[in-house]
Amino acid sequence: MSNIIVTPSYRDHRGIGLIQLNRPNVLNALNTETLVDIVETLESWSDIRAVIITGSDKAFSAGADIKKMAEASAMDQLLDQREKLWKRFSMIRYPIIAAVNGFCLGGGHELAMSCDLIIAGDKAKFGQPEINIGTVPGAGGTQRFTKAMGKSKAMYYALTGEMINAAEARELGLVAKVVPASTLMQETFVVAKRIASKSPVASSLIKESINQSFEMSLSQGLMLERRNFYLTFASDDQKEGMNAFLEKRTPDYKGN
C-alpha cells in the first residue's frame, strides 16, 4: 500500500493537486518514508498552482510512527533525513493547504503547521502530545505553535499535552477556517480554486514574504516585501492583472 494517494490535477479543479495520507492502520502516522513521498511529489509538480494535503475522516495524522521510533538511538535520529526533508518542504513555492479532519497530533500537527494555511473540520483535534511519551516536539512543534498563539498558550498545550478542538484552534490563530466535517474537502477546494485563479508569481512572492517575516526584523521584512513588490513588475502576470482590472474582465494568468 502506498503511503500517499496522489491526484495531480482535477478536471474541474485545474491546477490544484491533492495529496492524501494513506496509512489507515496507524491513523496516518508520519514516518520518514511518507515524508519522502510527500516532498518528492511536491517537487515533481511544475504546473500546479495550489496543493491540498489531507488525511482521512478519522485522522489527518495522529503523530509520528512511535512503534518505529521507540527503540531508536540519538544517532539514529541525527542521521535520519527528516531534517533535510522538512527544509525541502519549506522551499515549495506554491501555496499548500492542510485540510484537517479528526486527529492532527505530534508530527502530523507539525506537518499541518508547515503548510501555508489550515482548514479544519469542526470535529478536528490538534496538539503536541510528545510530553506524554517522554519526549519533545522535533519538527517545529514548539516554534510554530508559539508563533501561532504566543508563549503562554504554547507552553500550556505543549507541557500538558492537552488537545485543542477546532473552534479553539481558530480562536488561537492556528486554523484559518472551520467548516462542517462532512463538507471539509468541498470547502477546501473552494479556497484552493480561489488561490489557483490568482497570479502564481504573486502567490509565491506573498508566501515567501509572510514566511520570512518570522525570520526577520520588521525593517528586513519590509525590505523583502518591497523587493517582491518591485519584482512583480517584471512579470507578465502583473501586466495582465492590471490591464484586466482596467478593462473590467477576468485576468488570465500564465505564471510568468
Image: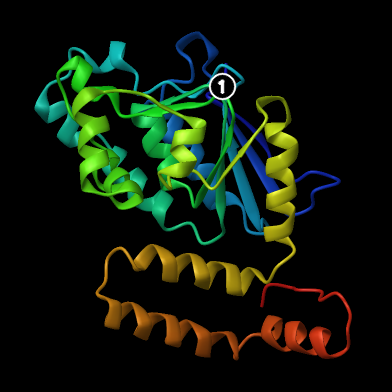
Res 8 visible: no
Residue 82: image location, x then y, percent? 30, 38
Image-based side of 44 in relation to 72, left or right: right
Residue at (42%, 58%) from the top-left corner?
Answer: 91
Image-based side of 50 in relation to 74, left or right: right
Which color mode does the image show?
rainbow
Residue at (70%, 35%) from the top-left corner?
Answer: 185
Residue 150: image location, x then y, percent? 27, 49
Q: Amino acid at mark 1?
A: Asn
The quadrant of the rendering that contains the N terminus is: top right
Residue 166: image location, x then y, percent? 50, 32
Residue 205: image location, x then y, percent? 51, 73
Residue at (49%, 65%) from the top-left corner?
Answer: 207
Between residues 5 and 169, which one lies in front from this camera angle? 169
Residue at (66%, 58%) from the top-left corner?
Answer: 49
Image-based side of 60 in relation to 36, left or right: right
Mark 1 = which residue? 22
Numbered-mark total: 1
Image-based side of 209 in relation to 69, left or right: right
